[in-house]
Image: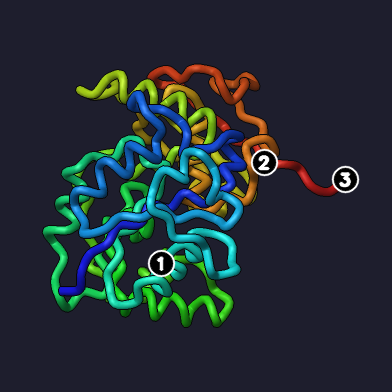
Amino acid sequence: MRPLYGLILAGGASKRMGTDKAALAYHGRPQLQAAFDVLSPLVEKCFVSVRADQTEDPLRAAFPQIVDSVEIDGPAAGLLSAHQACPDVAWLVLACDLPMLDRGTLENLIARREAADVAVAYRSEHDGLPEPLCAIWEPEALDRLEQQVLDGRTCPRKLLINSPTRLLEPHARGALDNINTPGEREDAARRLEHPTGVPMIRLTLEYFAQLRELAGTREQSLETAFATVGPLYEELRETYAFPFEASKLRVAINGDFAPWTQPLKDGDHIVFIPPVTGG
């Protein structure tokens, strides 16, 4: 098999978080350092993917870097820049915003790799689709991604969906949860404080208008470990491709309008109310 290098994607703007996600400390050190510490012993070489304007950032400057050489937005820029720098190696690509990630998840990913694979990825716990930012990308997959980008499509997940990707079931529950917002950050900190497991609560969700169409149902019952409705909506938004940011919606809990930060309890009935159009 091709040599396996590691790439930690740290070039994002962290707009939804409002502060640099790579610098957040979930484990007593910056998350970028935590990601590098868990990945680097498992690969031959390990790099941090950065934008050109981040090379002198004190946090990122401490690591071997691959600077974006592809002028597109999103994680595909880091993937293709690494492929251009080292075209004959496979890359274990890791987003820097995965504080729940455990070493066993990476070891299992590597152990299941075979010479004939185009890519190896985990199946998302939320929608069953490939997780592109904790995955092994072989050169063939990155060649395909390069062609996809030339055709105007920059989504790495779509490349894995449309390729013969080896899909694995999740190794540890919640290990690949992206932490993108302040609400999700608070929830992740709470979960890390309770490593034996955060109690699950059962909720009833109700959708209206376009949200109902995208979710494919008016009412849904689910279990969650989220403490507030904000990060729950962000997870649903990713799962169902809801077009609205939370700030554009109203939320009602048990019949009363509520803030996104209101604590949830078992049995709550939640209604998401999208913007009203027309007159």
Residue appearing at x 27%, y 56% in the figure = 122
Label 3 Cα neighbours within 10 Å, binned few <14 / some 14-19 / many ≥20: few
Please state, as top left, top right, bottom left or bottom right, where the C terminus lies in the image. Answer: top right
Residue for badge 3: 279
Give amino acid for label 2.
Pro
Q: Which residue is mark 2?
A: 274
The circle drawn on residue 82 is 1
Observer-side mark, 3 or 2, equals 2
Is residue 127 in sight in this rendering?
no
The amino acid at mark 3 is: Gly
**Residue 25 percent coordinates (x, y):** 41, 28
What amino acid type should be assigned to the residue bearing mark 1?
Ala
Tell me where residue 1 sits by quadrant. bottom left
Question: Residue 29 got which mark?
Answer: none
Q: Is residue 73 above or below residue 203?
A: below
Label 3 – label 2 distance at C-alpha? 15 Å
Mark 1 or mark 2: whose residue is earlier in sequence: 1
Where is residue 5 drawn, in percent x and y? 27, 62
Marks 1 and 3 sit apart, C-alpha to C-alpha, by 51 Å
User: Residue 248 appears in which quarter of the rendering?
Assistant: top right
Taking depth in this image into account, of 82 and 182 the one nearest to the observer is 82
Task: Please indicate whether residue 203 sits to the left or right of residue 105 in the image.
Answer: right
